[in-house]
Amino acid sequence: MNYFSTPQVIGRGAYAVPDFPTPESLIAHLDYLGIDRSLVYSVVAQDYSPVCGNQELIAAIEPYRDRLKPVFVLTPSDYFEEGTLAWLKEQATRGNRSYALRLKMSRFPLRLIERLLSELHEFHPVFFIDRVDNNLTSADFEQMGVLAGRYPKAYFVICRQLWTSLAETVDLMWRYKNIGVDTSYLHIRRSIEMIVREFGADRLYFGIGHLSQYGAAIGALAHAEITPEQREMIAHGNLENLLGIAPATGKLAHEPDLADKPLWNSFRQGKPLSGVKVIDIHTHLAGPNTRGWMLPEPHPSKAIGEMVRVMDRYGVSQSVLIANRALFSDLVRGNREAEELAGRFPGRFKGYFVMNPWHRDEVDENIIDEFFRRDYFIGFKLLPGYWLVRIDDPRYTIVYEYAEKHHLPILIHTWTKEIEPLAEIARRYPHAKFIAGHTGCSTAGSEHIIADAEKADNIYLDFTAWFCSTTKWFELFKRFDKSRFLFGSDAALHNESYELACFLSQPVPDAELFPILAENFERILADRR
């Protein structure tokens, strides 16, 4: 399989440590993943000067012209600079007609690019626009529709699209045929299949996202339930057709040495995991919802059957389940419903008891005892960032005291300021096991949780949604014993194959990952009283 990725950025800029400071570092990453070609733009063009960075990019990637293809950063000021528009047109006549719009960094709304677009329209320009980091606002989505309708020869690819605005992206794709999306952040379960079904495989473009994501998009595409022909189109054919670039005649990437990574080597080819036990410690009994997720099952009773089918498809032995009805509606009914539905599939599920502080008057220790005396519930789930109740609120005390008494895990959604006193609380209840769901998730959030985990050794780090952070997961192995790490995926909201691929492709031997897949969590459960 050949792979051709949507834009990566190279160089040293002003605001972050770069993933790829040189073309050579990007080539090494592509080779590790087996990716043949990538579009690329310059951080100098983004942070300092578009015209300087764009022109320097051509020379920088010349030694790798068979594998790296240029993308030029545009801003409205390009129109007024002497010679810049003429240079862009000259490059377009040579086939270099790909552009990156970095709206937030360049400080302009999307509509201001129209004057340049009108000049470049005859060349069938292709614009790549990242969604992450608030690079696209709702107003920009609306303006993209206006531009797509007004300039039909132009094409817009929305890259690094998270769940937060997938509905806006899908709506634009429905309205305008010259808008597509890349796969780099398509982590929502069945999102690839949904887009192929609704719009055709030719509207999807392969992308890999940040360095920290490694092979997430490769695994998601390999396991997507689409035809081999559609997979080939998404992997490289669509970008080649869009940009008028001839297909590669063979593999351009050097075959990676994966002798110590048999799990990843198998999984990236679309095969299920075998010979290893996998416990996904962070999953949801999802069903319908009101938070922008686009999922096909209308009821939890259907969702749980689909979860088992997918677990078998990927080689996941067991999942620890969170009842979404309990998170967002009737607490007691939701927890009980999850237990009853999981009972249809003996051995495949354990559960977290959701304790919403707004429902504290419905639950006392006797009720919790009644739930925990059976075999299903093994710990608690808290969602403070959604409920907007800090974790030091006294309504959570019943959870902490019960977990302390029985040595139980508590999975806490760690994303926002509601979890600030985590280290203090963990030290107060040393026999409870505090699982930092998502490990803070964003780059800033992960730094906070990592600092907390250094202060309390009963804080565990959950892999779920690590693609939201630019921090390199495997580098945390230098700071914590590997017994502190757990694998979770947010299935069946997230695509479990995307999360597994992100985890398995981390550049450490598989042998170092084995305990994280099941053993560490089994050790936590073995300590229950």
Image (spheres, helix red, strand yellow):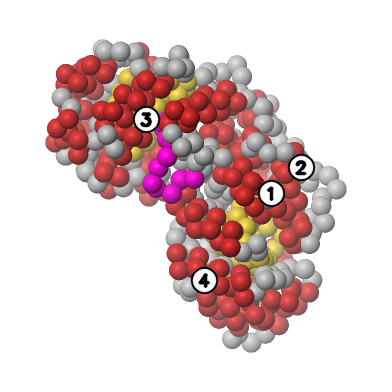
Q: CA distance from mark 3 to mark 1?
A: 33 Å
Q: Which mark is residue 229?
A: 2
- Packing grade of label 4 (10 A; few <14, some 14-19, many >=20) is some
Mark with earlier residue (3, 4): 4
Which residue appears at 43% of the width and 49% of the height? Answer: 292
Residue sticking out furthest to the front: 298
Name the residue that disc number 4 marks.
143
Mark with earlier residue (3, 1): 1
User: What range of the chain is rendered magenta?
Assistant: 283-294
Q: Quadrant of the C terminus?
A: top left
Which amino acid type is marked by label 1?
Ala
Q: Secondary structure at mark 3?
A: strand
Name the residue that disc number 1 marks.
201
Which amino acid type is marked by label 2?
Glu
Q: Main secondary structure of the magenta part?
A: loop
Which residue appears at 65% of the width and 59% of the height? Answer: 40
Which amino acid type is marked by label 3?
Ile
Does residue 293 sit above or below 246 in this rendering? Answer: above
Residue sticking out furthest to the right: 249
Which residue appears at 53% of the width and 66% of the height? Answer: 102
Q: Secondary structure at mark 2?
A: helix
Count the marks: how many? 4
Give yes or no for residue 284 being in the magenta stretch: yes
